[in-house]
Image (cartoon, helix red, strand yellow):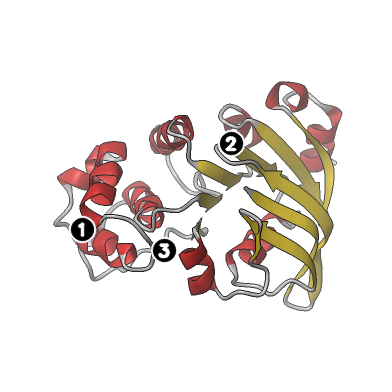
């Protein structure tokens, strides 16, 4: 379980997140929604150990992680997939995946099999240089790299960004499959319709604060969603 309590965090000199509370129970997929500039990515960077929170608590399975560095957070069982499809461009697909496994826990062969079952395209291109792959394939690889750490909590920042609609479907089919397998997921996604189609629960951010929360069927046509994106 991931528990964020009274988190206050900054982006540069700007206080981008102001005292938010979020919970991601084990085995659930929770979405964090909002327009650009709402504070979503700053929240995830604080959770992942990239930004040090100003105040507040971040706990993973009961252990405080808010003062840990990124590699320490990974060792505790949280894997972060940031915007921008971070892969090691000169290495092959399989080299990217096996390299990532050393940062986490679990059996490398079993983890590789899981990733290739989730993304058959990566299995087909396992010897291809990562930097020569399409944007969609690199996004699959970025998620695969995170899974190679055997995370208890998977944190995804805007996985649909910049992808063609057909590839977005592939990526979100994989996210839904991970959810069915029991993977705990915190998802930041600007496309509310896509996120609400896969999540168990969602929070809506605006200007650094949580302005609404609830089950997807409650939020889908809510005034709070419209206000957060259009107001």
Query: Viewed as shown, does residue 48 lie left or right of 123?
Result: right
Looking at marks 1 and 3 on the same chain, the residue that comes earlier in the sequence is marked by 3
Residue 221: which numbered mark, if any?
A: none
Which of the two discs, 1 and 2, sits closer to the camera? 2
Percent across and percent down for residue 188 are 61, 47
Label 2 SS:
loop
Comes first in the chain, label 1 or label 2: 2
What's the residue at 67%, 59% (across, down)? 59
The residues tagged by marks 1 and 2 sit, at their Cα atoms, a distance apart of 29 Å
List x then y, in percent, for residue 63: 64, 62
Between the C-alphas of marks 1 and 3, the distance is: 15 Å
Whole-number angstrom distance, CA of label 2 to CA of label 3: 25 Å
Q: Which residue is mark 2?
A: 28
Seen as rendered, the residue at the extreme bottom is 13
- Establish if 44 lies above or below 164: below
Quickly name the residue at label 1: 94
- Give the x, y percent position of residue 70: 53, 72
């Amino acid at each position: 379980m991931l528990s964020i309590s009274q988190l206050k965090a900054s982006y540069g000199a700007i206080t981008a997140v102001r005292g938010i509370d979020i919970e991601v129970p084990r085995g659930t997929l929770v979405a964090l929604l909002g327009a650009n500039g709402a504070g979503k990515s700053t929240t995830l960077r604080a959770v992942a150990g990239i930004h040090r929170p100003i105040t507040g608590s971040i706990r993973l399975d009961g252990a405080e992680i808010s003062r840990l560095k990124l590699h320490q957070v990974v060792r505790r069982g949280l894997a972060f997939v940031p915007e921008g499809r971070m892969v090691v461009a000169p290495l092959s697909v399989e080299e990217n995946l096996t390299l990532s496994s050393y940062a986490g826990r679990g059996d490398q062969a079993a983890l590789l099999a899981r990733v290739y079952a989730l993304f058959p395209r990566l299995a087909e291109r396992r010897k291809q240089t990562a930097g020569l792959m399409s944007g969609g394939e690199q996004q699959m690889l970025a998620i695969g790299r995170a899974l190679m750490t055997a995370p208890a909590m998977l944190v995804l920042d805007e996985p649909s960004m910049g992808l063609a609609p057909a590839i977005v479907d592939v990526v979100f089919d994989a996210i839904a499959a991970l959810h069915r397998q029991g993977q705990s997921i915190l998802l930041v996604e600007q496309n509310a319709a896509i996120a609400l189609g896969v999540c168990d629960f969602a929070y809506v951010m605006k200007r650094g604060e949580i302005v609404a929360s609830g089950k997807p069927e409650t939020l889908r046509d809510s005034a709070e969603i419209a206000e957060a994106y259009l107001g």
